[in-house]
Amino acid sequence: MKAKQKKTGNFIIGFSAAFWRLILCCMIVCMRIERKENFMKIKSLPEEERPVEKAILAGSQCLSNAELLAVILGSGTKEKSAIGLAEEVLAQGSGGLAELADCTAQELTKIHGVGQFKAARILASVELGKRIATRPRQKRVSADDADQVAALFMEDMRYSKRETFKALLLNAKGEIISIETVSVGELTSTLVHPREVFHQAVKKSAAAILFVHNHPSGDPTPSAEDFKTTQMLVECGNLLRIKVVDHLIIGDGRYVSMQGMGCMQRA
């Protein structure tokens, strides 16, 4: 009788252990299926709703920011689809696309799922966008039109976290022959020296020069240093017989023309 009870007890223990092993296996399988479903999320969407197919069928202008970035990323992770990863990238900080435009590779690779290759893709796409927004328009820009010059640099400089000083070298017809980056400063200021400013102008036989720099704060209101720098540059240009046409200060969607304020005449 005792042997029979012992045998029955062993059977129950064995059955219970097998039962819980089965439950555990089922849970693991479910988790794997769930992960696979998340990973396959984009492929499971209707063709017209997948980012790549949507861009081809309806045009890239129909894609959201996350979908556009998902196309650039190419893939997600085991836990997230490419769109989910794109949303996480865009959610970094509070600036959205504006902040993405100023991200570094080191900052991007801190995001789980973004390695060096994907970071390079993002940075290359941002840079290509900047070049498309500015370079093709250079020859059509009139240096006498402050609106055109400001528009040429607005998208490239309005979100920059560092103050950058550029010089536009002009020929006798007022056409842009070269754009030189004179200096890149810290968060709030940049150092400008006439030697660096006019070196390329003399070397490339520029007839005139126009200066552009940004205010990282987004407020283009000239500072006392801006007035002082402009006067100094105009005086140096007069000595070299290279006319300083204007000095534009770029803010967030706004700009100020020092020429428009009458600073060139006073200098």
Image (tube, grey):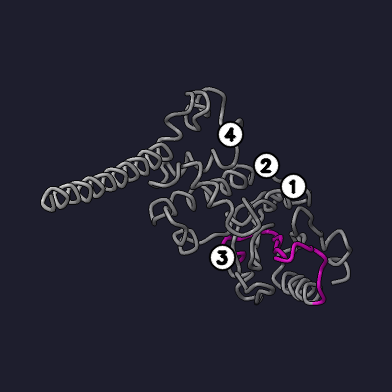
Within the magenta stretch, is there residue 57? no
- Whether pointer 3 and pointer 1 mark residues with C-beta atoms closer than 8 Å, the reply is no
Mark sitting earlier along the chain (3/4): 4
Q: Nearer the viewer, residue 188 or 179?
A: 188
Q: Earlier in the sequence, mark 3 or mark 1?
A: 1
- Is label 1 in a helix, a strand or a loop? helix
In the drawing, what numbered circle is on residue 203? 3
Q: Is residue 141 left or right of residue 21?
A: right
Query: Which residue is labeled 4 in the image?
Result: 63
Name the residue type under label 1: Gln
Query: How many numbered dots are placed on residues in this image?
Result: 4
- The image position of residue 138, as x and y in percent, is 63, 46
Q: State whether residue 45 is above or below residue 99.
A: above
> Residue sitting at 35 percent across and 44 percent down?
27
Label 4 sits on what residue type? Leu
Q: Earlier in the sequence, mark 2 or mark 4?
A: 4
Q: Which mark is residue 140?
A: 2
- Residue beneath the point at 82% across and 76% down: 224
